[in-house]
Amino acid sequence: MGAKNSCEISRLPQDCLTRIISLTSPRDACCCSAVSTNFQLAADADAVWEHFLPPDLDHILSRTEDQLVFTSKKDLYFLLSNRDIILDDGKMSFRLDRSSGAKIYMLSASRSAISIIWGDNPQYWQRVSPNRDSRFSEVARLIIVWWLKMSTRFSCKILTPKTNYTAYFVFKLEDDSSGLDLPIDALIDFGEQESRHKICLQPRSSSTRQTPNNAIRYPRVRDDGWSEVEIGEFYNDCEDDDEIVELDVREVNGLWAKRGLIFYGIEIRPKK
């Protein structure tokens, strides 16, 4: 009975199949392409993958100098989910979540993207060229401070609506880093939503990091070699409203000098 129904479905007109598949997800569309030749033609159609791409993609791509070469909307989708596109002269990067098509942004440590207290004073912070494992041309290197504070704000309209997002603090520590084992306040403020957590960039020991029910969040190493720690999460429920998402990371109570932090940026991506 199931095989007969599958056969009947595959006999539908291709434009009808295309319409049906476009109402699913990118992952489902890829599965459909393996069913039959007719399904493959429908699932690979531009009309399907146009639906999975952000409606404001033309505006987004107008802000990059990266050269994008593709032959179909499906090619473009996977191109954008496999690489980061630099926007606004290095202010941020953009890519798509492969399974859902939701937008992912990384806000760089540049002055135009994130405010760092004393970040313009070379006595405390340096703007340096990173190694090859960075998508940006510069990162922020902490020389020494007693107060650590980074903040940024952006419109919720740049993100995919009706999506749960998580923000991450992305960084590395130098071998001689110190003073970064103190709990740091991490705040996300968005409309009526507020997320407050304690994070730590330099755990004192692996046993501390693995303590059950510990209220402090600790970092993990990413695939690209950088480390990240979760700042918090929020639900992007805005569609037409231009509400502002505010993120703040700070430690201003400690009496110890902090040094040896390489700050890469803040990444906002769909919650898994």
Image (cartoon, rainbow, N blue to C red):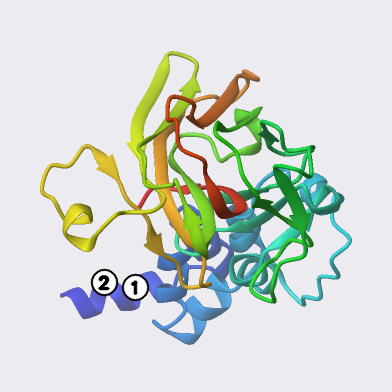
- Looking at the rendered structure, the secondary structure element under dot 2 is helix
Mark 1 — residue? Answer: 8
Name the residue located 53 percent from the left edge and 68 percent from the top edge.
13
Question: Which disc, if any, is residue 196?
Answer: none
Q: Are marks 1 and 2 in contact (CB under 8 Å)?
A: yes
Viewer-nearest residue: 173 or 97: 173
Question: Which three-letter amino acid code belongs to the residue tagged 1?
Answer: Glu
Q: Residue furthest left?
A: 212
Q: Quadrant of the N terminus?
A: bottom left
Position above or below: 169 against 13: above
How many numbered badges does the structure rendering display?
A: 2
Mark 2 — residue? Answer: 5
Position above or below: 252 against 140: above
- Looking at the rendered structure, the secondary structure element under dot 1 is helix
Name the residue located 44 percent from the left edge and 47 percent from the top edge.
180
Residue 147 percent across, percent down from the top left: 55, 31
Residue 66 percent across, percent down from the top left: 84, 66
Residue neighbourhood size for the residue with mark 2, other residues' Cα within 10 Å, grouped as few (<14), some (14–19), many (≥20): few
Position above or below: 6 against 19: below
Name the residue located 70 percent from the left edge and 65 percent from the top edge.
135
Name the residue located 43 percent from the left edge and 84 percent from the top edge.
36
Question: Which three-letter amino acid code belongs to the residue tagged 2?
Answer: Asn
Viewer-nearest residue: 197 or 63: 197
The image quadrant that residue 233 belongs to is top left
In this view of the protein, can residue 219 be seen by the observer? yes
In-image side of 20 versus 215 (left or right): right
In this view of the protein, can residue 21 be seen by the observer? no
The image quadrant that residue 156 belongs to is top right
Residue 177 percent across, percent down from the top left: 50, 57
Viewer-nearest residue: 268 or 216: 216
The image quadrant that residue 24 belongs to is bottom left
